[in-house]
Image (cartoon, rainbow, N blue to C red):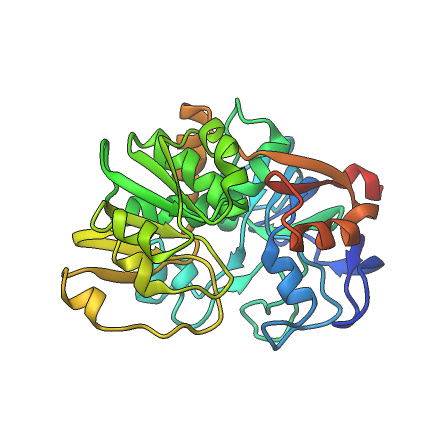
Amino acid sequence: MIKTSVYAATDAASPLAPFTVERREPGAHDVLIDILYCGVCHSDIHQARNEWGGSIYPMVPGHEIIGVVAQIGSEVGRWQVGDTVGVGCFVDSCRQCEACEAGEEQYCHAGASFTYNSREQDRITPTYGGYSTRITVDESYVLKIPDGIPLERAAPLLCAGITTYSPLRHFGVQRNDRIAIVGLGGLGHMAVKLGKALGAHVTMLSHSPGKREDAFRLGADNFIVLRDAEAFAQNAGRFSFILDTVSAQHDYNAYLSLLRRDGTMVLIGLPEPTPLAAGPLVMGRRRLAGSLIGGIRETQEMLDFCAEHGVAADVEVIPIQNINEAYERTLKSDVRYRFVIDMASLQ
């Protein structure tokens, strides 16, 4: 086993602090990765503080990992020592179910092994994430980071990037489609960039007029402040697709009214339960759907797309010692738009 320095939560109430875990020695199909950067996702906070229940401690958060291959197993064929690689939100799956065979391992019927706060496929061994100096991962769940994307700005693509790219692609957003993004945060800022790169006409929907300038800087074509019923009425039936990134409770029914006939609204946030009326769906043959992350194949497609179109996350790089402060700032939306940890600070 490889003793590894990490930052971990030892219970739901304690701040993250230095800790040591054991990583497995690379097996025949494993790669050992020295971690350079790890993004900070809002879900890291939810899980470290057990806000979703079922948290496993000690917990090492982090599933937006960029690093360099330091060692490979005897049968590894796709990676070489020195390759720049990424690890996203999961590190294994059953590989046999319909979802896995379709390249959508995130929906594994048996349950994917998520990068942290999860179990390996033996359902016993805990997984530890990227707030760490290194990680051992099966070669099939490692991603190539293309040239041209600054590495610190590539890290959030492995969660925020793929979480927004996957529904845009799956639901068929095309050039000149009129789409809207709800919420300008870590997810929303990537949705604007990716929607624009796909050639869509992108509108940012917000309750915060102060975000107008940022929305246009990121590539939005329009910015609408939705604070009252009149604003919703003025924009009824305007969009073919809405990507809702908001995790706070809000009224789905009002946003569904903004869709044209046969329009689709996709939820990627996880807000508290909200009442849903049949009327806004039935009267316009509209759809309300959800989407998780993407599989390995689609995540690699997303990374290559971002490299081709010059898309990367807007980040603030921090040392690991500032992680608890970063959590509090994230809760206050005091980041534009994703914290990324420089893991050299843990050496």
Q: Which residue is drawn at 22% across and 65% down?
A: 280
- Residue 305, above or below 97: above
Image coordinates for residue 227, horizontal then vertical, percent: 42, 53
Image coordinates for residue 224, horizontal then vertical, percent: 38, 41
- Residue 124, above or below 214: below
Q: Is residue 80 visible?
A: no
Locate the N terminus by quadrant: bottom right
Q: Residue at x 47, y 39 (%)?
A: 190
- Residue 71, above or below 146: below
Image coordinates for residue 36, horizontal then vertical, percent: 70, 37
Q: Is residue 316 left or right of residue 224?
A: right
Q: In this view, does 220 lie to the left or right of 234?
A: right
Q: In this view, does 111 lie to the left or right of 21?
A: left
Q: Residue at x 30, y 56 (%)?
A: 265
- Which quadrant of the figure has residue 221? top left
Most extreme residue toward the front, as rendered?
A: 230
